[in-house]
């Protein structure tokens, strides 16, 4: 499986992975059969927020990603609860090392870019971007730029399918 790594060569341990050959949809089906309630939660990358923090990996930048992911999750889940949209299979924010000029008050200010990604998929092997209503994306953008003043001044939405893209950015 493409996301499975090994142990360092100098370790004397063995990796036991009984589910190694199963894909995400197969793992979910097994979890449902076993009555495991977290079977339906969205996938989270093994390396954590590091794969959503492109460029320099600093505590401050990871903190920005954590806050922006929480905003995306809150807004999408609330909109789905209200019946305004279908909840995507996976949805998150990633911080790009792309600085652009913006305006804070009457002053030009440079900030980084957050990309919001939401996809529909059955197994994670292929995915289609989710068509999120513009009103929800606008609310997400406003919340992110207000919460991250001084570090983020632009929010974009990724409409790339998998393939050619991947679900995560890194």
Image (cartoon, grey):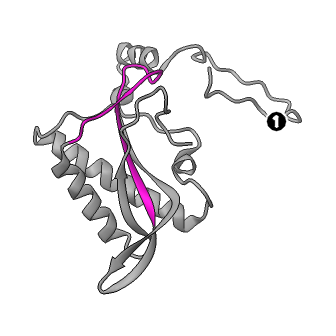
Does residue 152 lie above or below 45 as drawn?
Answer: below
Q: Residue at x 41, y 67 (%)?
A: 152
18 vs 90, left or right, is right
Q: Secondary structure at mark 1?
A: loop
Does residue 92 lie above or below 161 as drawn?
Answer: below
Residue 1's spot in the image, x, y percent? Answer: 62, 20
23 vs 122, left or right, is right
The quadrant in which residue 87 appears is: top left
Q: Nearer the viewer, residue 51 or 154?
A: 154
- Image quarter where the C terminus lies is top right
The quadrant in which residue 10 appears is: top right
Q: Residue furthest right?
A: 10
| Residue 125 located within the stretch drawn in magenta | yes
31 vs 143, left or right, is right
Q: Residue at x 39, y 46 (%)?
A: 92
The range drawn in magenta is 112-132
Residue 138's spot in the image, x, y percent? Answer: 22, 56
Does residue 42 lie above or below 69 as drawn?
Answer: above
158 vs 59, left or right, is left
Residue 64's spot in the image, x, y percent? Answer: 45, 63
Q: Residue at x 15, y 40 (%)?
A: 81
Circle 1 residues within 10 Å: few <14, some 14–19, many ≥20? few
Q: Residue at x 61, y 28 (%)?
A: 3
Q: Nearer the viewer, residue 8 or 153?
A: 153
- Which residue bears the numbered disc 1? 8
Q: How many marks?
A: 1
| Residue 76 located within the stretch drawn in magenta | no
The quadrant in which residue 79 appears is: top left
Residue 63's spot in the image, x, y percent? Answer: 48, 63
């Amino acid at each position: 499986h493409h996301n499975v790594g090994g142990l360092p060569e100098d370790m004397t341990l063995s990796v036991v992975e009984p589910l190694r050959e199963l894909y995400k949809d197969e793992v979910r089906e097994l979890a449902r059969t076993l009555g495991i309630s977290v079977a339906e939660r969205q996938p989270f990358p093994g390396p954590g927020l590091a794969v959503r923090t492109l460029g320099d990996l600093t505590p401050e930048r990871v903190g920005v990603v954590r806050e922006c992911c929480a905003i995306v999750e809150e807004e999408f889940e609330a909109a789905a609860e209200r019946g305004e949209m279908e909840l995507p299979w996976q949805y998150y924010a990633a911080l790009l090392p792309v600085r652009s000029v913006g305006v804070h008050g009457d002053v030009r200010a440079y900030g980084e870019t957050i990309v919001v990604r939401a996809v529909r998929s059955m197994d994670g092997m292929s995915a289609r971007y989710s068509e999120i209503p513009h009103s929800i994306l606008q609310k997400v953008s406003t919340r992110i730029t207000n919460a991250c003043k001084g570090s983020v001044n632009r929010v974009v939405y990724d409409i790339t399918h998998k393939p050619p893209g991947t679900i995560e950015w890194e």
